[in-house]
Amino acid sequence: MKYRVQNPSQTQQIAAELARRLRGGEVIWMEGDLGAGKTTFVKGLAAALGVEEVVTSPTFTFLRSYRGRALTLHHFDLYRAQDADELYELGLAEYLGESDAVCVIEWNKLESPVEPIRVRIRVVGDTEREIEIV
Ligand code: ADP
Ligand code: MG
């Protein structure tokens, strides 16, 4: 599916639509340049899953987990990870595919045990984005 959005809240609406399809066990790869809106999208996902905490980018910790209504959201940001070995040593791969959780990953460097959902965000203009979900 391909969408055109005009502002951050529309991006979060698309995320909320995706959230409704999630049943647990999914792995979502966020793709797009720095500043495209990946974290913005994840915030929309979190809100729609019933996360009440403020979602902030786990740039230095690699992972933050949030309890939603029915599912836990594991939010990864692997931008600063040196290599995959480091991440496997930290045990991060063990979260992938958990049946009562959804993993959403910015700058993925891990192999996914399940076919990932790919969310690609492309900057079109100042606040215009193209979002493709495959
Ligand atoms: P990323 O995680 O991809 O680096 P962020 O979500 O952290 O990007 O930042 C995206 C920035 O772009 C935010 O400042 C946000 O307000 C802005 N922005 C403008 N238009 C949009 C849009 N349509 N969707 C998402 N973010 C947008
Ligand atoms: Mg980000």
Image (tube, rainbow, N blue to C red):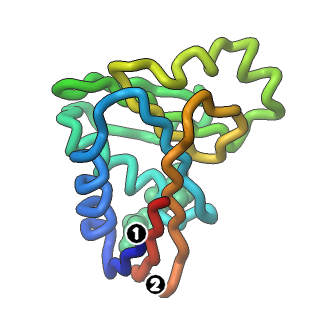
For mark 2, give the secondary structure. Answer: loop
Mark 2 sits on what residue? 126
Q: In this image, 11 relative to 63: left or right?
A: left
Q: Amino acid at mark 1?
A: Met
In whole angstroms, how far apart are the C-alphas of marks 2 and 1? 22 Å
Is the N terminus in the top left, top right, bottom left or bottom right quadrant? bottom left
User: Which image quadrant is residue 32 in?
Assistant: bottom right
Location of mark 1 (residue): 1
23, 73: nearer the viewer: 23
Residue 40 versus residue 89 in the image, above or below: below
Q: Tell me the quarter of the picture where residue 80 sits.
A: top right
Residue 102 horizontal side relative to residue 91, left or right? left
In this view, 45 is above or below 24: below
Residue 103 appears at what percent x and percent y? Answer: 46, 32
- SS category of the residue bearing label 1: loop
Percent x, y of residue 123: 53, 77
Of the two numbered discs 2 and 1 in the rendering, the one whose residue sits closer to the viewer = 1
